[in-house]
Image (spheres, rainbow, N blue to C red):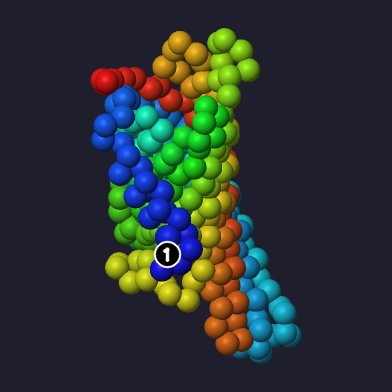
Amino acid sequence: MNRISIWVALILGLALSGSAAASGAFTGRVGATLGSYKFESRETDLGCCGNPIGFSISNEDNSGQYGLLGGLGLNAGMFFADVGLEVDTYSEKYDLDGDNVEDQYFRTDGLLTLGLFLGSNWSIFGGYRHATFGDGVFSEQYGNTEDGPFVGGGFSFRPGKKISLGMSAAYNQLTLSSDGTSFDDLDLDGFSVKFNLGFAGTPHAIFLRWQRFEGEYEEPGYLYEYTEDYLNIGYQATFGFTSW
């Protein structure tokens, strides 16, 4: 078991073991996102294909992105749990099936997060991400799937009576697969940073989020590298179901 999975298991175990008897609340949220997507790749000849050693070809793709989000949260004393879903699509369309008609492309993210509040300002968390890319919601048709654990931490405070500010950062260690087959030789890492502005006394908040995913595949004489960058602004409303 790798170190990321060990940290996730430790955080989840602590949260589950201590949450049952503590006072807390059960909440839900809905929202929307708008932003941009950028893909860059590079293929480098390391001796496989008759080009000078180090010869490379680059590719770049850019698109707008927009979508909806929702989730459920549970706070119990110093522990918290969250289930989130986000569905995004791209303003740029692609001919996915070769019929000369451009198709809509989707990214669907499902996340399970559990964590601990450390005092009144800090938190640590861990969880699992399941994301699909394809021609529909939770579809990998003409795309792929990314799965893996993540760990991170956050800091929040209230600079005044009317607003609250927060920041969080996380690292993902992901496995790329398609049609149930994993690409074991491809290393895929994800990084994310999120800034949140909440309005005290209301359910409303806005956020700015940056995500970057880096993949690398190497075989004798050949290297393929790519990066994906997402920059999104979003709005969400949080409402309470019950508290105790």
Q: Secondary structure at mark 1?
A: strand
Quarter of the view holding residue 53: bottom right
Q: Position of residue 66 (x, y in %)?
A: 46, 36
Q: Is residue 101 visible?
A: no
Q: Residue at x 66, y 88 (%)?
A: 47
Q: Residue at x 51, y 46 (%)?
A: 152
Q: Residue at x 34, y 50 (%)?
A: 13
Q: Which residue is mark 1?
A: 175
Q: Residue at x 38, y 22 (%)?
A: 238
**Along the horizontal axis of the image, is 8 left or right of 39?**
left
Label 1 crowd bin: few (<14), some (14–19), many (20+), radius 10 Å: many
**Along the horizontal axis of the image, is 178 left or right of 163?**
left
Report the label total: 1
Q: Position of residue 145 (x, y in %)?
A: 37, 59
Above or below residue 60? Residue 28 is: above
Q: Position of residue 211 (x, y in %)?
A: 55, 47
The quadrant of the rendering that contains the C terminus is top left
The residue nearer to you, when weighing 223 against 84, is 84
Quarter of the view holding residue 55: bottom right
Q: Position of residue 111 (x, y in %)?
A: 37, 45
Above or below residue 46? Residue 152 is: above
The residue nearer to you, when weighing 97 against 70, is 70
The quadrant of the rendering that contains the N terminus is bottom left
Above or below residue 48? Residue 173 is: above
The amino acid type, in three-letter code, at marker 1 is: Thr
Q: Is residue 31 visible?
A: yes
**Along the horizontal axis of the image, is 159 left or right of 177?**
right
